[in-house]
Image (cartoon, rainbow, N blue to C red):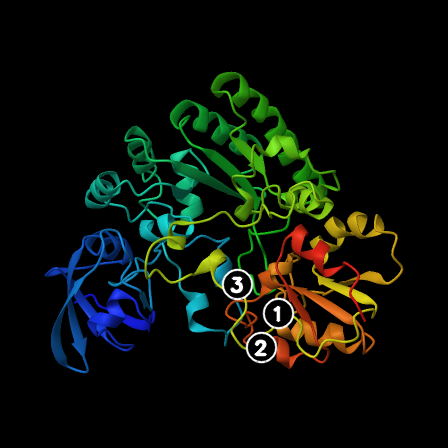
Amino acid sequence: MSTARVVAVAPGSPADEGGVVVGDLLTAVNGQPIRDVIEYRVLTDDAEVSLSIDRGGLELDIDIEKADGEHLGIEVDSAVFDRVRTCDNHCEFCFIYQLPKGMRKSLYLKDDDYRLSFLYGNFTTLTRFTEADLERVITENLSPLYVSIHATDPQTRNEMLKNKRGAMSLRWLRALLDHGIEVHGQIVVCPGLNDGDILEDTFCGVLDEYPELADVAVVPLGLSKYNREPRMRLHTAEEAGAVCDLVDEWQEIYRQHLGHRMVYAADEYYLIAGRPFPEAGTYDGFSMHEDGIGMARAFELEFAGATGEEAIGVQPGFFNWVDGAPAEGYRAPRTAGSVTLRPRAPRPDAPVGILTGHYGMTVLAPLIAGLERADVRLVEVEAQFFGGNVGVAGLMVGEDLQRTLSEQPAGHRYLLPDVCLSGGRFLDGLTPDDLPRPVEVVPTDGVALRRALEPRDA
């Protein structure tokens, strides 16, 4: 039986007044079992709602009256109440296979669940998608979805996913598009496997078979020092440049045939190739910002004040308005309640060190140089914990920050981007309080960094 555990009840909410308490297990709504928060939201939308509750083995029915569309005020422990549909692919480039042992159990879960794609923007390969899933997506208009394409050639896709269903699972992508579902695609490029002519064939396949796609992100594989797959290797600068050139060429082809650029290369490709980023206008509104597409240009605009006081940042997702859906993934709260913005802060006029990864150094260097301030510097955090080509700020961990900050002078202000935290913890389980220097946790956007660097009263 699928259940959802109540982890919070808003004071004065309909659920609170009806008698729902933390720890209750929600087993049904209006007599109907519920599989996930999507069904929960639909079934609790009416003015009269009946909740079936398991409270320590005692079965209760709680009837609640409220306004139409009013939220119950319940927060549950998961977005999926039945079992999350796990991924049965065996991709050589999967980063989960490259994690060290001993990290949080949740980090090792590979999902391939279209519901999490809808709720949080997770990418699904559709290899476990069914006719029943398609019917539900269409009936309930679960749009947009995010689909991992990797290659449109069936044999290449099968080889990449290491799954006999991989060759034909894109038939579900065609069906989704046929029914008007908005879909965003992703291609993880592995050198020697699906780059070069195969990547161009994939771009051609998108144009021929899936032209209704909203957009397609082209991203490099990530490798940690724990990678054990001999075919997986880093891009050379020449290979990265070839990807950039191919994307540029096909953007124009897509513009001529479809009216928009369709395909975009991740910022990492331009960094690896040593090339300047495309102009901001070529990202068409930064629709794939969360996939590392145009982050650098967006940050630049925010830092310069071109977006006013609004950050382009994370795009809002379904969970932001679905009552009860826990914030997870990219949209999870970065800091826990115990972490303040400026714990144990040094004096306001202290020199400032901005903590960032290898790629962040390249992006931020010209912005900080443009300030012409001797009191502001960048501090690179070398990714020894993961190793490999890991260089993004979001994968900075406590262990690497401890080593870096121990070599930095005391009494300075150290700014830490919140993207490396989830619920106040780094991926290795440490917290900002475990660091040898006090840090200021700052939202990861140009507006927030600009504000953090503004002169403060002593």
* Cα separation between marks 2 and 3: 20 Å
Point out which mark residue 98 bears.
3
Label 1 vs label 3, nearer the camera: 1
Circle 2: element type: loop
Disc 2 or 1, which lies upstream in sequence? 1
Residue situated furthest top in the rendering: 256
Q: Residue at x 78, y 65 (%)?
A: 456
As shown in the figure, which amino acid type bears the numbered disc 3? Gln
Picture layout, residue 75 above or below residue 114:
below
Percent of width and height locating residue 352: 80, 66
Q: Residue at x 36, y 53 (%)?
A: 116
As shown in the figure, which amino acid type bears the numbered disc 2? Leu
Percent of width and height locating residue 311: 60, 48
Disc 2 or 3, which lies upstream in sequence? 3
Percent of width and height locating residue 57: 15, 81
Q: Are marks 2 and 3 in contact (CB under 8 Å)?
A: no
Q: Callout 3: 10 Å neighbours few (<14), some, many (20+)?
A: some
The N terminus: image quadrant: bottom left
Picture layout, residue 253 above or below residue 354:
above
Of 407 and 445, which appears nearest the observer? 445
Q: Residue at x 71, y 48 (%)?
A: 303
Q: Is residue 122 visible?
A: no
As shown in the figure, which amino acid type bears the numbered disc 1? Val
Q: Callout 1: 10 Å neighbours few (<14), some, many (20+)?
A: many
Using residue 256 as the reference point, say whether residue 180 is left or right of it.
Answer: left
Rendered image quadrant of residue 126: top left
